[in-house]
Amino acid sequence: MRKLLGLAAAALLATGGAALAEWPEKPVKLIVPFQAGGTSDQMARVLQAGAQESGALSQPITIVNVGGHYSIGSRRVMEAEPDGYTFLIIHIALMGGEGTGALDFGWRDFEPVAGAGEFCLAPMVRKDSGIDSVEQLLAKAKDEPDTLIFGANLGAINHLAGLMLQEQNPGAKFRFVQIGGGTANFTALTGAQTNATVLSGAEVVNFTLLPDGSENPEAQIKPLAYTGAERFDGLPDLPTMAEEGYDMQFCVKSWVFAPKDTPQEAIDGFAAAMEAATETDRYQKFITDKGFADVFLKGEALQQDLESTWTAIEPIAKLATQK
């Protein structure tokens, strides 16, 4: 792998193209624009370890967590020197921030490098809610608009998914409230502080099933459907939204970006290192444990994925700005 990357660099230099000799010559920084411990941080670290184990890079990858709003770390990468040594890992929040106007920049202000892993979501209600299907949930949200409290992290993944869900039945309207991420929303729904939310497939398994896969009788919440194209292996009895008659898919990948004008050698080299990382046993165990789909994208396939995702997310994100 290293020899091939070196040959590619030599070829580019010989033809006069912009390239870096013997990339990488020093450690590569991967910026995580969130605090340590979250999904993006976990993905970054398993990719880091996988790249090292595979020997795909001659230099280590250094993870740098940037706390506060994710715009801070994202902007740091956007404004970094495009020298091939700074990369960003983030998810659909980057598009959500642009679509809502919370950010004055977006995904097209970066160079796409790779996309890895994918998880999808499940609308959740309490078991004692009297709601047993997405149809019943949306009917109640339409008949009694703005009364069902939907727990979310406003402007982020679960908020966008909730907005997309309510759009499946024109006139349906949830009352979105700031709760936070998966664990916080599980707690709020269990405690009847909210009436609905969405959780990832892995979170549903963790919060509603016993270790042997049977239903946890003490769980007070239940999923109604799954937003993936196919049923989730961890919840084989849970129908997809399509099976329930709704044209809704909402799944989230981890995307890696570089600053604009980063040399192609570095982009291709880092993408190759990420791809090698996804082939390691460590990574495969990670995505299995987390309920992620084994997806890897680069080049034109990645560009098409970004464009199609933006087409779906932009109008939904704009709904988040409406009062």
Image: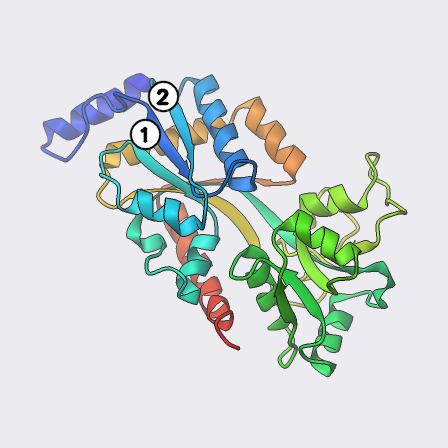
User: Is the residue under label 1 in contact with that under label 2 (CB below 8 Å)?
Assistant: yes
Asked whether residue 293 appears in the rendered view, the answer is: yes
Question: Which element carries disc 2, helix, strand or loop?
Answer: loop
Residue placed at 32% from the left, 23% from the top?
27
Residue 207 image label: none
247 relative to 89 in the view: left or right: right
318 relative to 259 in the view: left or right: right
Asked whether residue 230 appears in the rendered view, the answer is: no
Neighbour tally class for label 1: few under 14, some 14-19, many 20 plus, Cα within 10 Å: many
State the CA–CA distance, disc 2 to disc 1: 8 Å
> Residue 68, position in %: x, y?
45, 47
Residue placed at 45% from the left, 42% from the top?
67
| Residue on which disc 2 sits | 57
Is 236 placed above or below 30 here? below
Tell me the kind of residue under disc 1: Gly
Q: Between residue 77 and residue 248, name the one nearer to us.
A: 77
180 relative to 141 in the view: left or right: left
| Residue on which disc 1 sits | 269
Tell me the kind of residue under disc 2: Leu
Q: Between residue 301 and residue 67, name the one nearer to us.
A: 67
Residue placed at 81% from the left, 43% from the top?
209
